[in-house]
């Protein structure tokens, strides 16, 4: 077997990364980690109060996700993770989890994002979307990954990911 594959579904809040990641995980049967579950209580509290996280708030959270991946990578187990991974520096940390890290950037129209955020129960208020969009750095040409248009149906998005990675 070659390098284990670690799929990181990234994007701002409301981009559907958890929905698409779960659908891909259902097809592949790989272990999945929801990035939100790795936030320390202080981060959740800040976001719940409408306060954007700083880089200092994010480093430990990102390291814990990379560690989770590295543990599975060491045993040859592929993974699926959801994580905003808004900046390249954050993605660099996540890449430490395994050589086969591949980013799937769920991206879409700002108004669709706000609509989705307003329609769900989540600790991240829609008021923080603007700060996330300001922080977001799209995937660079030298980063292993792909963009998904979240306006498309989930089944189509899953098919795009599996096709791109030759997993269908």
Image (cartoon, helix red, strand yellow):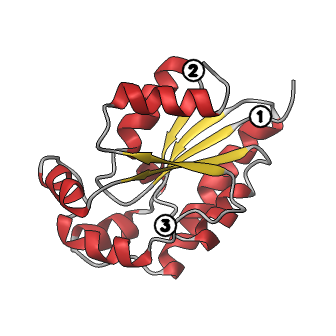
According to the picture, the residue beneath numbered tag 2 turns out to be 28
Is 55 in front, or is 134?
A: 134
Residue 4 — which label? 1
According to the picture, the residue beneath numbered tag 3 turns out to be 86
Q: Residue at x 66, y 54 (%)?
A: 66
Query: For mark 3, does the 10 Å Cα neighbourhood hold few (<14), some (14 to 19), or many (20 or more) residues?
Result: many
Residue 163 on image: x %, y %:
59, 27
Query: For mark 2, does the 10 Å Cα neighbourhood hold few (<14), some (14 to 19), or many (20 or more) residues?
Result: some
Q: Residue at x 51, y 71 (%)?
A: 137
127 left or right of 104 in image: left
Query: For mark 1, does the 10 Å Cα neighbourhood hold few (<14), some (14 to 19), or many (20 or more) residues?
Result: some
Residue 103 on image: x %, y %:
59, 50
- The first of marks 1 and 3 along the sequence is 1
Q: Are marks 2 and 3 in contact (CB under 8 Å)?
A: no
Is 64 in front, or is 150?
A: 150
79 left or right of 61 in image: right
Distance from Cα at disc 1 to Cα at disc 3: 23 Å
Distance from Cα at disc 2 to Cα at disc 1: 13 Å
Q: Are marks 1 and 3 in contact (CB under 8 Å)?
A: no
Q: Quadrant of residue 72?
A: top right
Q: Residue at x 27, y 69 (%)?
A: 129
Secondary element at tag 2: helix
- Please, which residue is most extreme toward the right here? 1
Residue 14 on image: x %, y %:
28, 53
């Amino acid at each position: 077997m070659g390098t284990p594959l670690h799929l990181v579904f990234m994007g701002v809040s409301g981009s559907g990364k958890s929905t698409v990641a779960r659908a891909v995980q259902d097809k592949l049967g790989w272990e999945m980690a929801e990035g939100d579950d790795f936030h320390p209580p202080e981060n959740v509290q800040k976001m719940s109060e409408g306060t954007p996280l700083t880089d200092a708030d994010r480093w430990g959270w990102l390291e814990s996700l990379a560690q989770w991946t590295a543990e599975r990578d060491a045993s040859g187990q592929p993974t699926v993770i959801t994580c905003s991974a808004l900046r390249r520096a954050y993605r660099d940390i996540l890449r430490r989890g395994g050589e086969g890290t591949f980013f799937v950037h769920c991206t879409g129209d700002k108004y669709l994002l706000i609509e989705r955020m307003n329609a769900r129960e989540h600790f991240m208020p829609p008021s923080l979307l603007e700060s996330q969009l300001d922080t977001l750095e799209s995937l660079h040409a030298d980063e292993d990954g792909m963009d998904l248009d979240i306006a498309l149906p989930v089944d189509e998005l899953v098919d795009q990911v599996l096709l791109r990675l030759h997993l269908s």
